[in-house]
Image (spheres, grey):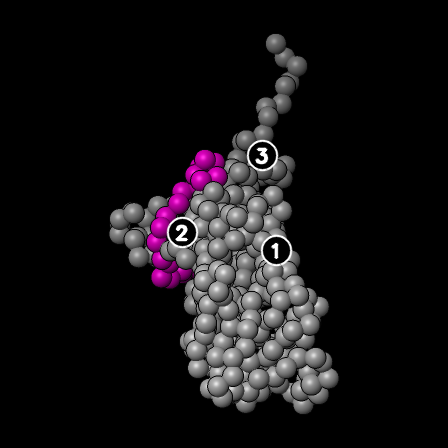
Amino acid sequence: MTDDSGETHEVVVVGGGPGGLTSALYTTRLNHDTALVDRGGGRAAMMLDTHNIIGVTEETSGMEFLQTAREQLEHYGTTLYRNAVTNIERTGEPSPRFVVETDGGRLRADAVVLATGFNDVRPEPPLPRTGRGLHWCLHCDAYMFRDEPVYVMGHDESAAHVAMIMLNFTDDVDLLLRGTEPEWSDETDELLRAHPVEVVETELSGMFKDDEDPAWLGGFEFEDGTRREYRGGFAMYGAEYNADLAAGLGCERTDDGGIAVDEDGQTSVEGVYAVGDITPGNNQIPIAMGEGAKAGIAIHKQLRTFPKSLSELSADGTGPSVATGDD
């Protein structure tokens, strides 16, 4: 794509995760000229194994899952760009309504879908490999640690509650504060201390690998000289939303920094939709895909030409001719 290309599409989807890919699939198959702009990476791309997606087997990596989806889009005619979007502006015109600036050129669109997600905040090392002892989502990965020793790393309300929730899967749960004072409420502290969760205050000094499978975490060493074994665990330090584009467009935000949307994924800016991890709710691939489908259908209803009213048909001459009965 060249700097002066200025291609026009009906729909431009920003972000190539499961939500964005599904939005593009729906708008393409609903006969709208659709482009998807993806810079690469993202949370789904980091997955070593795929969980909780019916019909997709566990040994499928995130990269394989996303590549299959991109091939589907190409098959149906979606235009794919491997670029980063740097800015989106409203044109003030009825069509195209938006100019999408990328590091490879300019696109114009009547509708935009933001599927830019967020980045998990990583704690300081020592840390195991993501997917092999370091995990971010208990809904995805807690199943892997049934009856295994597990850590939860963090010091806020979410860390305390995730530690208690993990007791549904194993009775061996440690909450690692890593030398940081807890920030949860007194009520949460009382509740946590009543549960069989061991709160470990000492900072980490190192980690060791599993003897049988060195790709996996074996456990952590602590500054007080102790050593604890863990199969894996969850880091709970919050997220940084990739919402600069939404902010530039003036989209309403949630209290935690995400993008506020209605039930169809429409933001507070007409013609701008948001799906996936950038929106409120559980951060799950099937949920993002459902949001993408709903947004795609809503965009179709907004952009489609037919049906027209009788007055519109009469004005533009697209209605059927009326037979007079004269030969």
- Report whether 238 appears left or right of 79: right
Residue 99, numbered circle = none
Q: Nearer the viewer, residue 149 or 76?
A: 149
Helix, strand or loop for disc 1: helix
- Depth-wise, is mark 3 or mark 1 nearer the camera? 1
277 over 66 or under it: above or below: below
Circle 3 residue: 314
Whether the residues at callouts 3 and 1 have beta carbons within 8 Å, the answer is no
What's the residue at 43%, 48% (across, down)? 36
Quadrant of residue 102 in the image?
bottom left
Whether the residues at callouts 3 and 2 have beta carbons within 8 Å, the answer is no
Circle 2 residue: 37
91 over 221 or under it: above or below: above
- Report whether 70 appears left or right of 155: left
Packing grade of label 1 (10 A; few <14, some 14-19, many >=20) is: some
Packing grade of label 2 (10 A; few <14, some 14-19, many >=20) is: many
Q: Nearer the viewer, residue 35 or 152?
A: 152
**Residue 73 lies in magenta, yes or no?**
yes
Residue 287, numbered circle = 1
Q: Which residues are magenta?
A: 71-97
Quadrant of residue 83 in the image?
bottom left
Question: In the image, what residue type sits under mark 3?
Answer: Ser
What's the residue at 55%, 31% (across, down)? 318
What's the residue at 52%, 35% (across, down)? 316
Helix, strand or loop for disc 2: strand
Question: In the image, what residue type sits under mark 1?
Answer: Ile
Residue 311 in the image, given as x and y percentages of width and height: 61, 39
Measure the alpha-carbon separation of dots 3 and 2.
39 Å
Residue 73 in the image, given as x and y percentages of width and height: 47, 41
Residue 211 in the image, given as x and y percentages of width and height: 48, 65
